[in-house]
Image (cartoon, coloured by chain):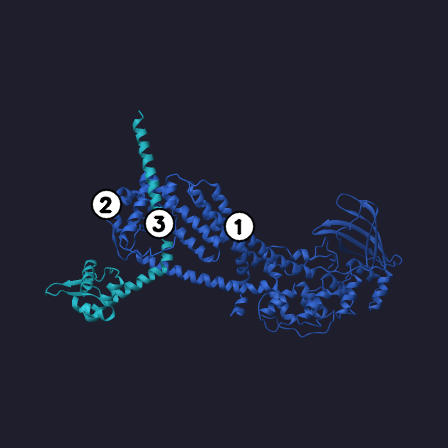
């Protein structure tokens, strides 16, 4: 379990994780009360977040009792390491991106570029289809 | 810290290399731009070779500059006037020599010797700044490379076996002999190759699922083409070049061009393998779409990344479609900017070198007007002469016979305009007297004849007034040496009088001018013995050199120390001899390596 790379949490998810690390496995109500202290958070919001986090694999849910108990899947140190790693990756992305041989450049194509690409591709397909037709016609 | 660094032997060569790299880089970039403009856009391999060649040039030129500076510094320091035959005579070179010998414009070496004081002080700063930049950027890339290695293992597992088989097949077709590991990774969003000895081809898991297999094959072919061409290794070297020349925009541009063409080369290879240009173009577009939709920010593509690597996708697809790249207007302002930058850089460096050489040349040329009063006495000397042209200029050899029958020759270099004409007679006039030459023999390479010398009695009178007795043989020699009365007067004004005539000639020969004496006085050196003045000149201890050493904060800069530094170029001082009084027969002459005038018959 600890060998896999933890998924990256959003800010809100990170806040919930901190609560769970502090309090240990907790119910939704307990988590919501803790969150309330810093930011007004509704019960449904907290529930929604915890459900998403379970899907993502950040937390595990114990459904033995009526009020489900959520626990963080990864220990705090591991998550910290992952976040620091993220920071470092971002800091050195200029170098790493330059040193690899990638199929596409690091910069994503803009919407205008994508539209133009689609046009060119359509043109290419059309042309090659016509060439195939001609080849088919030739005796 | 700057002071100690300034004395480091690497500062001069590297500093000049950096300065000259500015215009060299611009020229190379312009040259590459011209070449690329002429080459067809489809000729990716040739264009890539041109860009790589330009990159090699960009690194090689500064290295050559630095080596040139090092070699020139360690070159000959003593002047050696050309001699035709082994005749017993001292240094005779009365023409305005020297300035041409050590002041060649635009070579970095001469500029090092004669560098304007401001340039010399600038170099340590340049060196420091450059070194700091290289260290920082190098460290950055080192860490980046190290993090890249982690990517090979983290979040990765071997790819599905059927794909491994496919990869092997593609590798064979491309001619890749090394074993390439195909790996499925969660850390990337786009397939990539890491490593060159044992490369790893990382493919995002989403690509295996989200792309049609034929398209993914084409992409894998592109990546394997990188392996085949050793692109990873070349890219490492390219990054090293970018680090060394981080300050130069031309280097970044050329490097970028190389990367663009590299992708085009691999595109071409992938098309050759999969056989369908349209399929491959669709594969690239499909990959881009996949990347955008998966939305996971992965390690190689942080939010808002820079476009430093590879060509734009649109550009590549247009090229595959056979369409010309549009947006040339984007290049135009950049091209003009580079051209302007080159012109400025070239002019600036030329100006720097030129001021340096002017400073040096100014120290060499003298302006001593000739005597106007001429009162020629009877013939005092006569003998033979011959005119020869060799080495650095035309010479006339004057052979003199004394009453005792002994003959001695001396060589006299002629100034421009002095030469035997087509007629039978020609003359050479100097302050000290006049030579009248009669041509008796003329063939294709030499002219010869007899001559007479008549001393100028006005010169003798004036010299007498200055305290010098110019006896008969001396007048002859002074005339040959081109010793002007104004020169002697000038020396008297700066405090050098009552010297031996032989010494006067030596001072004249080695350009110990009143100007030189004044410059030394301005730097704090007064009352230097004549033989040391001559030594300073012989070993090219120029006022600029002294200023440079003073600027560097070198301690205890006595004249002897300056000579040590110039001759040996190091801090180690020679054991200082006790200062003897001026005595031509002393061993100081020998220690300084000068010919002893007492033993020198013609001096």
Q: Are marks 3 and 2 in contact (CB under 8 Å)?
A: no
Same chain, marks 1 and 3? no
The residue under label 3 is: A110
The quadrant where residue A48 appears: bottom left
Q: Are marks 1 and 3 in contact (CB under 8 Å)?
A: no
Mark 2 chain? B
Q: CA distance from mark 1 to mark 3?
A: 31 Å
Mark 3 chain? A
- Left/right placement of residue B289 relative to residue B379 reads left
Q: Tell us which disc is closer to us: 1 or 3.
A: 3
Residue drawn at point x = 62 percent, y = 65 percent? B566
Judge by depth and name the residue closer to the eye, B133 or B230. Answer: B133
Q: Tell us which disc is closer to us: 3 or 2.
A: 3
**Residue B344 spot, x, y in % from top left:** 56, 54
Q: Which residue of the protein is positioned furthest toward the right in this rendering?
A: B378
Q: CA distance from mark 3 to mark 2?
A: 35 Å
**Residue B250 spot, x, y in % from top left:** 48, 52
Judge by depth and name the residue closer to the eye, B512 or B74. Answer: B512
The residue under label 2 is: B162
Q: Provide the secondary structure element on which disc 2 rests.
A: helix
Mark 1 chain? B
**Residue B166 spot, x, y in % from top left:** 27, 44
How packed mark 1 is, by other alpha carbons closer than 10 Å (few <14, some 14-19, many 20 or more), is: some
Judge by depth and name the residue closer to the eye, B164 or B410. Answer: B164
Q: Which residue of the protein is positioned furthest toward the left in this rendering?
A: A65
The residue under label 1 is: B339
- Chain A drawing hue: cyan
- Chain B drawing hue: blue
Judge by depth and name the residue closer to the eye, B103 or B292. Answer: B292
């Amino acid at each position: 379990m600890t060998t896999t790379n933890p998924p990256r949490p959003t800010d809100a998810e990170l806040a919930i994780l901190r609560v769970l690390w502090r309090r240990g496995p907790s119910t939704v109500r307990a988590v919501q009360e803790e969150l309330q202290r810093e930011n007004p958070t509704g019960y449904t919001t907290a529930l929604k977040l915890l459900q998403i986090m379970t899907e993502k694999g950040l937390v595990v849910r114990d459904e033995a009792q009526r009020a489900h108990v959520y626990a963080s899947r990864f220990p705090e140190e591991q998550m910290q390491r992952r976040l620091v790693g993220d920071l470092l990756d971002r800091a050195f992305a200029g170098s790493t991106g330059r040193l690899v041989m990638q199929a596409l450049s690091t910069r994503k194509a803009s919407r205008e570029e994508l539209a133009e690409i689609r046009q060119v591709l359509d043109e290419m397909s059309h042309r090659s289809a016509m060439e195939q037709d001609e080849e088919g016609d030739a005796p | 810290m700057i002071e100690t660094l300034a004395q480091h032997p690497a500062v001069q060569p590297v500093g000049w290399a950096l300065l000259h790299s500015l215009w060299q880089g611009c020229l190379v970039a312009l040259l590459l731009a011209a070449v690329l403009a002429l080459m067809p856009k489809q000729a990716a391999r040739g264009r890539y070779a041109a860009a790589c060649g330009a990159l090699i040039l960009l690194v090689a030129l500064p290295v050559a500059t630095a080596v040139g500076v090092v070699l020139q510094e360690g070159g000959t320091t003593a002047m050696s006037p050309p001699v035709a035959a082994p005749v017993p005579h001292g240094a005779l070179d009365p023409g305005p020599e020297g300035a041409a010998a050590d002041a060649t414009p635009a070579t970095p070496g001469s500029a090092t010797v004669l560098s304007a004081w401001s340039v010399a002080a600038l170099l340590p700063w340049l060196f420091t700044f450059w070194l700091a930049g290289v260290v920082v950027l190098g460290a950055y890339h080192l860490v980046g490379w190290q993090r890249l290695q982690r990517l090979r293992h983290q979040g990765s597992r071997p790819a599905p076996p059927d794909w491994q088989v496919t990869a092997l097949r593609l590798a064979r077709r491309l001619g890749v002999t090394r074993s390439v590991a195909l790996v499925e990774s969660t850390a990337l969003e786009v397939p990539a190759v890491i490593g060159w000895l044992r490369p790893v081809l990382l493919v995002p898991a989403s690509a295996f699922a989200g792309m049609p297999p034929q398209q993914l094959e084409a992409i894998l072919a592109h990546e394997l083409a990188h392996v085949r061409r050793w692109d990873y290794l070349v890219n490492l070297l390219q990054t090293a070049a970018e680090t060394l020349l981080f300050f130069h925009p031309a280097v970044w541009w050329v490097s970028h061009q190389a990367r663009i063409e590299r992708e085009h080369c691999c595109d071409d290879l992938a098309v050759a393998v999969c056989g369908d240009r349209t399929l491959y173009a669709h594969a690239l577009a499909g990959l881009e779409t996949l990347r955008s939709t998966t939305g996971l920010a992965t390690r190689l593509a942080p939010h808002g990344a820079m476009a430093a690597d590879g060509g734009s996708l649109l550009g590549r697809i247009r090229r595959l479609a056979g369409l010309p790249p549009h947006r040339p207007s984007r290049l135009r302002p950049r091209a003009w900017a580079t051209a302007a930058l080159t012109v400025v850089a070239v002019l600036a460096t030329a100006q720097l070198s030129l001021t340096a050489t002017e400073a040096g040349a100014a120290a060499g040329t003298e302006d001593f007007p000739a005597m106007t009063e001429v009162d020629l006495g009877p013939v005092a000397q006569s003998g033979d002469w011959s005119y020869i042209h060799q080495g650095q200029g035309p010479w006339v050899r004057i052979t003199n016979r004394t009453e005792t029958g002994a003959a001695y020759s001396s060589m006299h270099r002629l100034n421009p305009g002095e030469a035997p004409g087509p007629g039978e007679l020609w003359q050479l006039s100097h302050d000290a007297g006049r030579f009248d030459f009669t041509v008796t023999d003329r063939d294709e390479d030499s002219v010869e004849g007899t001559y007479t010398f008549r001393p100028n009695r006005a010169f003798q009178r004036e010299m007498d007034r200055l305290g010098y007795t110019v006896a008969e043989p001396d007048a002859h020699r002074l005339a040959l040496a081109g010793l002007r009365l104004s020169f002697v007067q000038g020396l008297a004004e700066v405090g050098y009088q009552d010297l031996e005539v032989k010494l006067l000639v030596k001072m004249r020969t080695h350009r110990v001018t009143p100007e030189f004496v004044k410059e030394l006085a301005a730097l704090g050196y007064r009352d230097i013995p004549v033989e040391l003045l001559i030594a300073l000149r012989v070993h090219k201890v120029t006022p600029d050199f002294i200023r440079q050493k003073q600027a560097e904060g070198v301690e205890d800069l006595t004249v002897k120390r300056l000579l040590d530094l110039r001759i040996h170029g190091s801090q180690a001082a020679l054991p200082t001899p006790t200062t003897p009084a001026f005595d031509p027969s002393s061993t100081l002459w020998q220690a300084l390596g000068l010919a002893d005038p007492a033993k020198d018959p013609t001096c």
